[in-house]
Amino acid sequence: MKIPKTTKDKPYIEFIITDKNKIKLFTTSYFWGGKNKFFYCPEGIGNSCLPKQLPLFFEVLKKRETKNVSKQIEKLKKRIKEIKKLNICQ
């Protein structure tokens, strides 16, 4: 992955991880609020950080999304159990 060169006017790297797990990197002058604040856009999920922090932000995002998916799976498992308990058309 090639990290774009930052400038004084655009010191941050903005990244977007698309729904197809492609990583898009841009330089930007905006900081989106830290390693625990991500934004969602039509392309996927993203944030911005200093270039040195990029691996840390990716790791935090990976853990966060893994936790979110695990929670969704647990909710779906509970829902399946509830549906199986229904006495409809038996």
Image: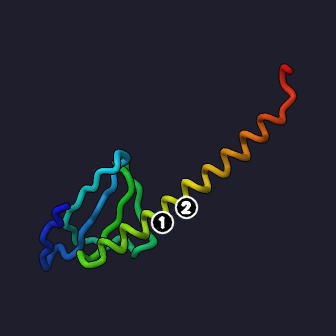
Which of the 4 quarters of the picture holds residue 47?
bottom left
Name the amino acid type tagged 2: Lys
**Foreground residue, 19 or 26?**
19
Q: Taking 62 as reference, is 52 above or below it? A: below
Residue under label 2: 67
Q: Is residue 89 left or right of residue 75?
A: right
Locate residue 30, reporting x and y percent: 28, 71
Q: Amino acid at mark 1?
A: Lys
Picture quadrant where residue 69 is located: bottom right
Q: Is residue 78 above or below residue 56?
A: above
Which coloring applies here?
A: rainbow
Q: Are marks 1 and 2 in contact (CB under 8 Å)?
A: yes
Quarter of the image that includes the N terminus: bottom left
Q: Is residue 58 left or right of residue 69?
A: left
Name which residue lies at 41% across and 56% down. 40
Residue located at (66% from left, 45% from top): 76
- The residue positioned 34% from the left and 50% from the top of the image is 21
In percent of width and height, residue 89 lies at 84, 20
Q: Which residue is mark 1?
A: 63
